[in-house]
């Protein structure tokens, strides 16, 4: 079995894995990052989104061996002593209901705002198109992303 070395939320995780092990299962089982959820296992829902070297990826569509030598940030590693502004915005703007899609939405938003710190509503909806929510209707998610953009610029809405 191949050995992988992946930096997860700042900590090096080394383990022997089956070559077919998905990154999402490596994160949950080998790195104990249970905040990264398994949604559909087909890359349709986006619930398992993490940052791989700073870019959002669906961890159910990548093998752990493909992430070998790279850095992964999960929802659990996003915040320091305080919540990340995106997490804070989702809380303040009620960008969640059941919360199942929230880790993926937050991680996709972090990537979106790193590329476009001032997105329009259309750009937000386009940027999150690979993340499905079955509860909210997306209105408060879009508001959350807009608020997060303001928070990250040092303002408030």
Image (tube, helix red, strand yellow):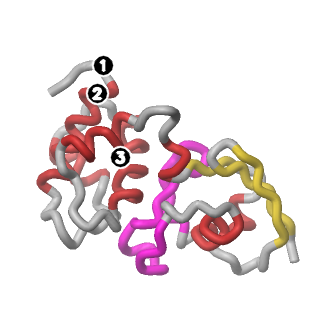
Label 1 secondary element: loop
Q: Name the residue: 48% across, 39% down.
A: 79
Is residue 135 in sight in this rendering? yes
Tag 1–tag 2 contact (CB < 8 Å): yes
Q: Name the residue: 35% across, 34% down.
A: 85
Tag 1–tag 3 contact (CB < 8 Å): no
**Disc on the earlier residue, 1 or 3:** 3
Q: Name the residue: 18% across, 50% down.
A: 94
Q: In what quadrant of the picture does the C terminus appear?
A: top left
Task: Looking at this view, name the residue that lies furthest to the top.
Answer: 154
Determine which of the numbered discs, if any, sits on residue 154 in the image: 1
Residue range in magenta is 37-59
Task: Tell whether 58 sits left or right of 145.
Answer: right
The residue singled out by tag 3 in the image is 109
Question: Between 16 and 93, which is closer to the camera in this rendering?
Answer: 93
Q: Is residue 97 above or below residue 60?
A: above
Number of residues whose C-alpha sits closer than 10 Å to that of mark 1, classed few (under 14), some (14–19) or many (20 or more) = few
Gap in Å between the C-alphas at discs 1 and 3? 17 Å
Residue 65: give x, y in percent of width and height. Answer: 74, 67
Number of residues whose C-alpha sits closer than 10 Å to that of mark 3, classed few (under 14), some (14–19) or many (20 or more) = many
Gap in Å between the C-alphas at discs 1 and 2? 5 Å
Residue 77: give x, y in percent of width and height. Answer: 55, 46
**Disc on the earlier residue, 3 or 2:** 3
Task: Looking at this view, name the residue that lies furthest to the front.
Answer: 81
* Residue 42 belongs to magenta span: yes
Label 2 secondary element: helix
Number of residues whose C-alpha sits closer than 10 Å to that of mark 2, classed few (under 14), some (14–19) or many (20 or more) = some
Question: Between 147 and 60, which is closer to the camera in this rendering?
Answer: 147
The residue singled out by tag 2 in the image is 151
* Residue 134 belongs to magenta span: no
């Amino acid at each position: 079995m191949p050995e992988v070395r992946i930096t997860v939320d700042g900590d090096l995780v080394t383990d022997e894995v089956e070559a077919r092990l998905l990154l999402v299962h490596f994160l949950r089982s080998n790195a104990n990052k249970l905040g990264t959820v398994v949604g559909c296992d087909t890359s349709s829902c986006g619930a398992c989104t993490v940052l791989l070297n700073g870019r959002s990826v669906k961890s159910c569509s990548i093998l752990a061996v493909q992430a070998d030598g790279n850095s992964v940030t999960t929802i659990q590693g996003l915040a320091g002593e305080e919540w990340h502004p995106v997490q804070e915005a989702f809380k303040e703007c009620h960008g969640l209901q059941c919360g199942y899609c929230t880790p993926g939405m937050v991680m996709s938003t972090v990537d979106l705002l790193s590329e476009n710190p001032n997105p329009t509503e259309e750009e937000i909806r386009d940027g999150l198109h690979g993340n499905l929510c079955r509860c909210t209707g997306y209105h408060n998610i879009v508001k959350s992303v807009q608020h997060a953009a303001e928070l990250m610029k040092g303002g408030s809405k």
